[in-house]
Amino acid sequence: MLVHRSKKQLSFLLALLLVLILGSGCASDTVGSNVATPTARAIAQGTPLTIPVPVCHLSSCTNLTPVHGARAFTDTWENIHLFETFDFKVSYPRAIAKYYDFIWGASAANAYAYRLGNPNVMLSYYMTMNRYDGTFTDTELGKQRGLSYWKAVHPDWILYKCDRTTPAYEYQDPNMPFDFSNPAVINWQLQTYVQPASAIYGYDALAVDNVNMENMFAACGHYDANGQWVQQYSGQNVDPQWQQDVVNWLTKMQNALHALAHPMLLIANFSSGAVPLNSSTAQQALVHVDGVLDESSFTHYGEYHLPDDQWVQMVQYVQAMQQQNKPFFMINEFKNANNVSHDDIEWVLASYLMCKQRLAFLYISQIQGYGSDSRISQYSLQIGSPLGDMYQAQNVYWRDYTNGEVVVNPGSNPLTVDTTSIKPSTSFVDAYGQKMSQSFTLSAHSAKVLIKQ
């Protein structure tokens, strides 16, 4: 099953970022002594003038093992770090395991081979938050049990729309939507998916799909065991009770995962959608996940390069989660995988390198084109480690690395930049090995990854 998602633009709000960072307890730190001094220039109106979230670069600020007994996350400080989104098209998992730090939705059949190829790889078992996903062994076969089955077995589990007749199916998915506020449903999920994943296959994490703060499919309620209608939600997209039930589900599931004899972490495909990220429920939800997967990232589900403030706020969001010792898994989609330009690839790579601290991972694909080993040679660029946070100079954003530079122009106008004011007497090639002039023009919503020659 593919990862589904809301196509609404995330409401990135700086207030959330400040709350997350202020609660992290980490002081900011500057790494290295060769950080270029930003040149003061005029910035386009509306663009934030600073990055208001201090980022601690010290390894002591990052807890790579947030739960005792769980597998440690990989430290992403050096170069580019990858994760794989599903593996149903992977034929030789042992051969590719060394290239990936995390597998979202690793199949049980491939688990042993991954371990042989990379003992440190983190494997996650896939399930949705509130849909039937088959049994543990047949999840990927797409087996469904229809309405008549669930009416006969667990009629009080079915989540309906406000007509009280139609199940609140998600994304045209025929799998039954459940009332995820029902403790019996959560216990069933634990027994059916979580416990076998932990005890039998030794999965490290639970990859939970469709953790949506919006009531996207107009769910309204369920019938109790006596056949009486129980109204839970308004059916509206933004519904406070739905939001609170999401928080409650995450809280209970995370607690159960951490308490296992072989603890598992909760990695959520999280979307706030029309619910502001600085809302109390969205903040509570983020507290009760151990990591975030985001399908919008810097290409907004394959629709466009994030512009201006949206790009800056995405950078801050990714940094804020890392400050909370929560990894951020960035999916960047493109409409046509066979027509992704060099500029598109550099946009994603540079954006990732701008916000990467010690817990950020990258994946690029066509829209919903998941399941295969889709590595490109640019992932192996040896840019080294950051020398500090990103900063503004010459009307664009820069970040200095030990073996290169990244520069991003998220604005709507082309801009000419000069590397001599950043690193004098240094020559660069781009991500494709092409020699760069010291002065070059960045088109609107574009970027460059520069590697020292």
Image (cartoon, rainbow, N blue to C red):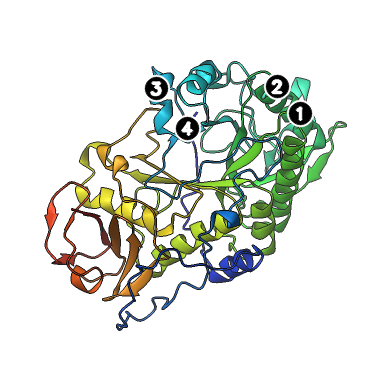
Query: Mark 3 highlights which residue?
Result: 89
Mark nearest the camera among 3 and 4 is 3
Sooner in the amino-acid sequence: mark 2 or mark 1: 2
Element type where label 3 sits in the image: loop
Sooner in the amino-acid sequence: mark 3 or mark 2: 3
Query: Mark 2 highlights which residue?
Result: 199
Q: Position of residue 349 (x, y in %)?
A: 32, 50
Label 1 packing within 10 angstroms: few (<14), some (14-19), many (20+): few
Q: Does residue 297 appear to the left or right of 36 in the view shown?
A: right
Query: Mark 1 highlights which residue?
Result: 261
Name of the residue lying farthest toward the right: 226
Label 4 packing within 10 angstroms: few (<14), some (14-19), many (20+): few
Residue type at numbered disc 3: Lys
Query: Mark 4 highlights which residue?
Result: 2
Sooner in the amino-acid sequence: mark 2 or mark 4: 4
Question: Disc 4, disc 1: CB below 8 Å?
Answer: no
Q: Residue at x 49, y 22 (%)?
A: 114
Question: Disc 1, disc 3: CB below 8 Å?
Answer: no
Mark nearest the camera among 1 and 3 is 1
Question: Disc 2, disc 4: CB below 8 Å?
Answer: no
Q: Does residue 212 appear to the left or right of 381 in the view shown?
A: right
Residue type at numbered disc 2: Ala
